[in-house]
Image (tube, helix red, strand yellow):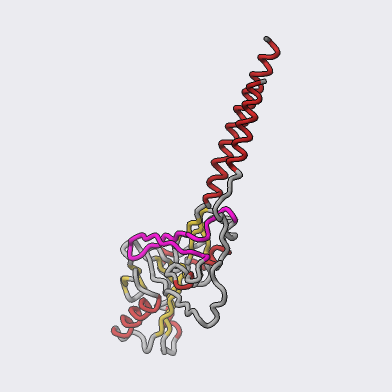
């Protein structure tokens, strides 16, 4: 019986320790914001082209024969996605280049869509092949990845080319109580180098962060709160205590039975 009493004392002590007062464990979005109407100017960051981006490029000119323009709107046969025609485009290779029909190889990595369009337009104009050409460039595989403490982690394809961190979190099913809203990490590739930034979704200056607007291929990581980590640790401790108590109780019963 002394063993059973000792086990009960250990259990009660563990419960009391787990119920100690905790620091604030949950934060709300824009917690420190009251009214920012007319006070904050949000400037979206123009996404730049990266390796493995898939681009849609269309060329139009003042030519009266549409067949002339059609010669410049042929997708690279090596980059055609048969299963999904919407992803037929020009793939930026590992050297940062694309190969455009009748124009040749063009370095695209690090350029914005407009800069690439201007480069193609200049080549067409300098070669006198088209009259007053217009070039439209779009991303076909703008996607981000959200991992960690969210409703459903994974890679998300964005049908448009501008998405902010709140929209991304919403698409991933929101951050539950167990996730840290005040220190969300963003992994981003810039000029071939990876950088890691942090954004506080509760702060009033969240809109000024360079990570408020996401870029293609960004990885968003939401870490668990200390309370969640502690709960997991306490769960493991509780399981061990339960196992120990079961062992002690069984041993005591066997002792009383066979003494």
Residue that extends furthest to the right in the rendered view of this protein: 257
Q: Nearer the viewer, residue 25 or 150?
A: 25
Point out residue 101 in the picture as x, y percentages from the top left corner: 36, 74
Picture quadrant where residue 189 is located: bottom left
Identified at 52% across, 83% down, the residue is: 38
Q: Nearer the viewer, residue 104 or 160?
A: 160
Q: Is residue 222 left or right of residue 46?
A: right
Identified at 59% across, 56% down, the residue is: 176
Q: Can residue 88 be seen at all in this image of the molecule?
A: no
Picture quadrant where residue 252 is located: top right
Say above or below: 7 vs 17: above
Q: Can residue 183 be seen at all in this image of the molecule?
A: yes
Point out residue 3 in the picture as x, y percentages from the top left corner: 63, 22
Say above or below: 28 vs 102: above
Say above or below: 244 vs 20: above
Point out residue 90 in the picture as x, y percentages from the top left corner: 41, 68
Q: How many marks?
A: 0
Residue that extends furthest to the top in the rendered view of this protein: 259
Q: Nearer the viewer, residue 99 or 226?
A: 226
Point out residue 116 in the picture as x, y percentages from the top left corner: 36, 76
Identified at 42% across, 71% down, the residue is: 47
Segment tinted magenta in the rendering: 177-202
Quadrant of the image for the N terminus? top right
Residue that extends furthest to the left in the rendered view of this protein: 126
Q: Is residue 182 left or right of residue 246?
A: left
């Amino acid at each position: 019986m002394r063993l059973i009493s000792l086990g009960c004392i250990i259990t009660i002590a563990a419960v009391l320790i787990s119920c100690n007062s905790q620091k604030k464990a949950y934060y709300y979005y824009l917690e420190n914001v009251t009214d920012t109407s007319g006070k904050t100017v949000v400037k979206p960051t123009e996404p730049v082209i990266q390796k493995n981006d898939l681009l849609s490029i269309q060329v139009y000119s003042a030519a009266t024969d549409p067949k002339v323009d059609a010669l410049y709107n042929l997708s690279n046969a090596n980059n055609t996605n048969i299963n999904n025609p919407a992803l037929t485009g020009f793939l930026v290779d590992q050297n940062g280049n694309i190969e455009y029909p009748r124009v040749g190889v063009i370095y695209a990595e690090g350029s914005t869509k407009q800069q690439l369009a201007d480069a193609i337009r200049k080549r067409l104009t300098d070669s006198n092949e088209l009259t007053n050409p217009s070039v439209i460039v779009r991303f076909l595989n703008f996607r981000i990845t959200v991992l960690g403490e969210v409703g459903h982690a994974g890679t998300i394809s964005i049908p448009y080319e501008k998405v902010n961190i709140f929209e991304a979190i919403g698409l991933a099913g929101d951050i539950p109580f167990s996730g840290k809203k005040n220190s969300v990490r963003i992994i981003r590739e810039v000029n071939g180098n990876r950088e890691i930034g942090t954004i506080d979704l509760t702060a009033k200056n969240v809109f000024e962060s360079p990570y408020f607007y996401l870029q293609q291929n960004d990885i968003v990581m939401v870490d668990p709160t200390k309370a969640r980590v502690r709960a997991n640790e306490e769960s493991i401790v509780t399981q061990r205590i339960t196992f120990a108590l079961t062992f002690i109780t069984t041993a005591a019963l066997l002792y009383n039975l066979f003494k």
